[in-house]
Image (tube, grey):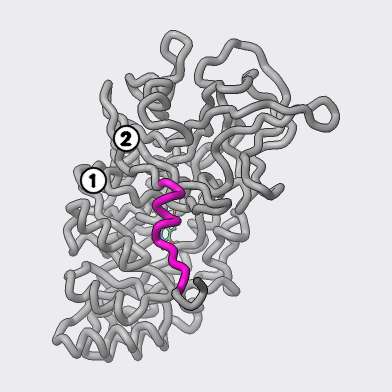
Amino acid sequence: MNHFELQNGVLHAENVALPDIADAVGTPVYVYSRATLERHAQVFREALSALDNPHLAFAVKANPNLAVLKVLAKQGYGADVVSGGEMDRALAAGMAPEDIVFSGVGKTAEEIVAALKAGIGQFNIESEEEGRELAILADTFSYRANAVLRINPDVDAGTHGKISTGKADNKFGVGIHRAPDIYGRLAALPGLNMRGVALHIGSQLTSLEPLETAFRKVGDLIAELREDGHIITHVDLGGGLGVKYRADDNPPDPAAYGQMVARVTAGWNVRLMFEPGRVIAGNAGVLLTRVIRVKPGAGNIPFAIVDAAMNDLARPALYDAWHDFEAVEPTGQKMAANIVGPVCETGDTFAMGRDIDSVGANDLAIFRTAGAYGATMASTYNSRGLVPEVLVDGDKFAIVAERIAPATILAAEHVPDWLE
Ligand SMILES: *Cc1c(COP(=O)(O)O)cnc(C)c1O
């Protein structure tokens, strides 16, 4: 469920008409709904209500906007961060350091030190080498870092190859069969408080089956680690729940996920941690765009050229992803069209031969389900600016990330004297 609906024939975000945002901020622009973010945060929490005090850490990489993080912080969410930059954002949004989990396969020494000094709650270690480095750095500052070992359960998440993370040949975590030995060596290091394991097998999962398979493997691993004498108090089950991008998508609902988790983890006797990203933010945002013009294409299917492009919303180009496209003021007429942006490569295609609301030059339209992995992946390719972001709350809205103009980016570049 989300709060982007027609009111009197005009698409609104909550009670704000999207044309009002386009007039005030220009297009393209990302628009987020506070009510939708809050609803999703609450639905996910309720889905896990059978568990004892689960730790909820929003995966910041899905939508790192400061105001979005603030909304989720107020919902009691912590953060899962994968860089020093994301950690700084989570802290700036008011999330408590102890509620922040630091994941990522390539944490630098500089990032580790910053996280230790900030008092980050948990490091999710992705290799023995990283664990040793963390231990040495922590020991240098006389800290004991809370840590869990991320394991790679070698399951096929059944999602797009570029967002699958739990197969043996993916770069993430340590192979589950090597985990007991590595865990034993890391647990002996003075700088570390090894307290459990973590996993995250991929994103946009549309079936619970691979998750359940992976969780069962973790259950066996916990038993083995305990037999080895380790005290396991925390297990981080990651994120990955898929969302509905198109009408016939049928992702598992959070309640079914929660029931599966409760069933599989019964008797684990640990504090469970979760890192949802897309399921919280995906349907809480749209990309508002304006049609520049429509030009004829092959086979009588025209190109609808919009002012948003692959640099603003990369998912179609990266993952062949589908985003629903709707006119902001639909007439009821339909047309078949190829939806493309202005960027000079064929990858800048949002849809081919799709049946859409009829649109013409200057009409406003939205790409739905753009609240996760949208603005955060934006680039300045083709010397386009960085797309702004707006947060709506009831009948008010605010710019929560300014448009960065091409001139601002140009101003940060320099021609050396010796080239003058
Ligand atoms: C990306 C990521 C997530 C969030 O994934 P979603 O599919 O957006 O829920 C959680 N944990 C880790 C370690 C990640 O890399």
Give the distance between the C-alpha atoms of the residues marked 1 and 2, in whole angstroms. Answer: 11 Å
**On the picture, is 135 further left or further right than 171?**
left
Q: Position of residue 154 (x, y in %)?
A: 56, 70
Residue type at mark 1: give it.
Lys
Residue situated furthest left in the rendering = 142
Within 10 Å of the Cα at label 1, are there few (<14), some (14-19), or many (20+) other Cα atoms? some
- Is residue 185 toward the left or the right of residue 176 in the image? left
Magenta includes 366?
no
Image location (x, y in percent) of residue 38: 29, 36
Residue 203 position in % (x across, y down): 50, 54
| Quadrant field for ligand 1 | bottom left
Residue 141 placement: quadrant: bottom left
Pick the front one: 375 or 282: 375
Q: Residues within 10 Å of mark 2 (few under 14, many from 20)?
A: many
Vertical order, 200 against 389 (above or below): below
Element assignment for label 2: strand
Looking at the rendered structure, which numbered label has been put on residue 286?
none
Q: Which residue is mark 1?
A: 70
Residue name at image x 67 percent, y 37 percent: 351
Please name the residue shown 56% across and 22% down the image.
362
Pick whichever of labels 1 and 2 is earlier in the sequence.
1
Q: Which residues are magenta?
A: 405-416
Q: Amino acid at mark 2?
A: Leu
- Horizontal and vertical percent for residue 97? 18, 63
What residue is at 29 percent from the left and 77 percent from the top?
112
Is residue 260 at all visible to an observer of this figure? no
The residue to which callout 2 is attached is: 391
Quarter in which the N terminus is drawn: top left
